[in-house]
Image (cartoon, helix red, strand yellow):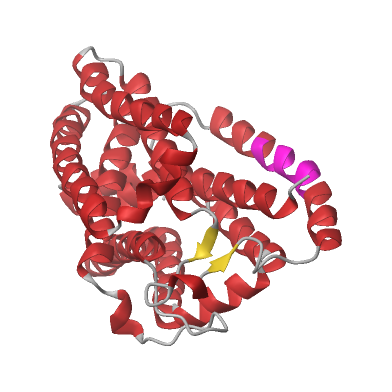
Amino acid sequence: MDLPATWFVLLGLLLAGYAVLDGFDLGVGILHPLARNDHERRVFLNAIGPIWDGNEVWLVTFGGALFAAFPEAYATIFSGFYTAFMLLLFALIFRAASIEFRSKLTSPGWRRAWDVGFFASSLLATVLFGVAVGNGMIGIPLNERGVFVGDFFDLLGPYPIMVGLLAVAMFAMHGALYLYLKVPQGELHARIGRWMWHTWGVFLVVYMLTTVYTLIAVPQAVANFERWPWAAAIVVVNVLAIANIPRAVYADRPAEAFLSSCVTILALVALFSMALWPNLVAARNHPEYSLTVYRAASGDKTLGIMLIIALIGMPLVIAYTTLVYWTFRRRVEIGPTSY
C-alpha cells in the first residue's frame, strides 16, 4: 500500500468534512448582522448551538493527522503561517466565547458586543481559511530545506485574497441554505429564502472569476487532469451541483439545495487536492523545493499504525456526528435555556 498517498487522501477527507460541517456554522456567523432583532439573532445561534463545537472536531483531527503523518510539512506550514494561525486561533476562540457568553446577560450592550464578535470572528476565520487554500494553490517561497523564507505579507497576494472572498461567498450561501432548513415558518423564514438567491448569485459570480483567475495564475493546477482524465467527472459534478441549487430552491426542495451545496464544497476540496498533488506545500520560487507527500512523510511504520487508529476512530466520529445531527434535526425552538 502507498501509505503517504493514502494519508494524503485521508487528510483530504478530513478537510472536506470540516469544510462541509463547519462551513454552514461560519456562514451563519457571516449572515448574523442581517438579523433584525434579538429574537432573530437567538434563532440563528440556536440553529447551530447543539452542533458547532462537534463540527470543529474535524479541524482538530486534521491538524493532528497532519502533524503525525507529515511532520516536515506541518513544521513548514505552522512556521510560515504563524501570524495567520494565531489570528485564526483567536477568531475560533472568540467565536466560541461569543456563542456561549452572549445570552448570559440581557443587557443590549452586552449582547450587541458579542454579536459583533460572532460576526467578525466568523468572517475572519473564513477569510483566513480561503487565503490558506489560495496560498496552497499558488505556492509559498521556500528554501532548499523546505523552510518558509517570506513574511506575512507574502501570503496576501491577489490570488489568495480572491480565494478568501470565494470562501466567504460559499459559506454564506451554505449558511443561508442551512438556516432555511432550521428556522420556523414565518417572516424570518421567508426573508432567508430571499437570502438564498442573493448568496447563490454572489457565489456564482465569485466562483467564475476565481476559476478564470486560477487558470491564468496557476496553470499547473490542471496538470494532473492530463494524467487522470477521469478527474473531469469531478468538474462536471461540481458544475451540476452549483446549477442544481437554484433549481431546488425554486422547486421548494431546500434539503436538496443544501445537499447540492455540500456536494459543491466536497467537489471543490477534491479539485484542490488534485491540483496540489503530489505536493503538500508547493514552492512558488523554486518548484523543486516543494514538500511532496513522499519527502515530508513519516516512516511507514508510523503511517501504518496511524492508519489502523484512523480506521477505528473515523467511523466513531462519523457515527457520533450522524447521531447528533439526527437528534437535533427539527426546526429551532426558543426556550428558557436556549442561547
Picture quadrant of residue 121: bottom left
Q: Nearer the viewer, residue 318 or 267?
A: 267
Taking the image as shown, residue 127 lies to the left or right of residue 93, namely: left
Asked whether residue 51 is in view, the answer is: no
Asked whether residue 72 is in view, the answer is: yes
Taking the image as shown, residue 317 lies to the left or right of residue 131, namely: right
Q: Residue at x 22, y 50 (%)?
A: 210
Residue 105, x across and y down, in percent: 36, 64
Residue 265, x across and y down, in percent: 39, 40
Q: Residue at x 31, y 48 (%)?
A: 27
Q: Nearer the viewer, residue 111 or 174?
A: 174
Q: Residue at x 69, y 65 (%)?
A: 297
Tell me if residue 103 comes above or below residue 171 in the rendering.
below
Residue span colored magenta: 310-318
Magenta-colored stretch includes residue 311 = yes
Q: Residue at x 70, y 62 (%)?
A: 69
Tell me if residue 29 comes above or below residue 158 in the rendering.
above
Magenta-colored stretch includes residue 314 = yes
Residue 222, x across and y down, in percent: 36, 46
Q: Nearer the viewer, residue 276 or 201?
A: 276
Instruction: Quadrant for the N terminus, please.
Output: top right
Taking the image as shown, residue 77 lies to the left or right of residue 114, namely: right
Q: Nearer the viewer, residue 128 or 42?
A: 128
Prevailing secondary structure of the magenta residues? helix
